[in-house]
Amino acid sequence: SVITAVGMAEQIEIMIAAVVIAVICMMFFAGPVGRFVAAHPTVQILALSFLILIGVTLIADGLDLHIPKGYIYFAMAFSLGVQMLNLKATKNRQPANEP
């Protein structure tokens, strides 16, 4: 979050405020998000795939191979949408009656 704040803002006060707000948000939401991710292993895989996608994008940018951000955002939004449908489907699925 520090690197993001430095990259997006020019005033030091805005950078400091952004980092402080990010830390406060992380303190409040770390527990619930951690429990949700621990309860849904497929979300862990999705998060790791997002990290790989961002890493590949950064490496490509470093090699002057620019990938349009719209492609990255669409891929992330599409996979997140599929994951949400998957979570809803597994939640609604009821076990088959055993004889």
Image (cartoon, rainbow, N blue to C red):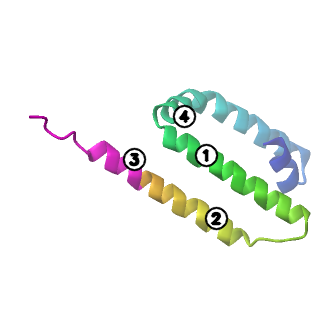
Q: Which mark is residue 33?
A: 4
Q: Is residue 8 above or below residue 97?
A: below
The residue at 91%/65% (across/down) is 63
Residue designated by label 1: 47
Q: Nearer the viewer, mark 4 or mark 1?
A: 1
User: Mark 3 or 2 closer to N-term?
Assistant: 2
Question: Mark 4 Cα within 10 Å, few/some/many (few <14, many 20+)?
Answer: few
Q: What distance separates the C-alpha of mark 2 from that of mark 4?
A: 22 Å
Q: What distance separates the C-alpha of mark 1 from that of mark 2?
A: 14 Å
Q: Nearer the viewer, residue 46 or 3?
A: 46
Q: Nearer the viewer, mark 3 or mark 2?
A: 3
Question: Mark 2 Cα within 10 Å, few/some/many (few <14, many 20+)?
Answer: few
User: Mark 4 or 1 closer to N-term?
Assistant: 4
Using the rendered view, name the quadrant where residue 62 is placed: bottom right
Q: What distance separates the C-alpha of mark 3 from that of mark 1?
A: 15 Å
Q: Are marks 4 and 1 in contact (CB under 8 Å)?
A: no
Residues drawn in magenta: 85-99
Question: Mark 1 Cα within 10 Å, few/some/many (few <14, many 20+)?
Answer: some
Q: Secondary structure at mark 1?
A: helix
Q: Which mark is residue 73?
A: 2
Q: Which mark is residue 87?
A: 3
Q: Are marks 1 and 2 in contact (CB under 8 Å)?
A: no
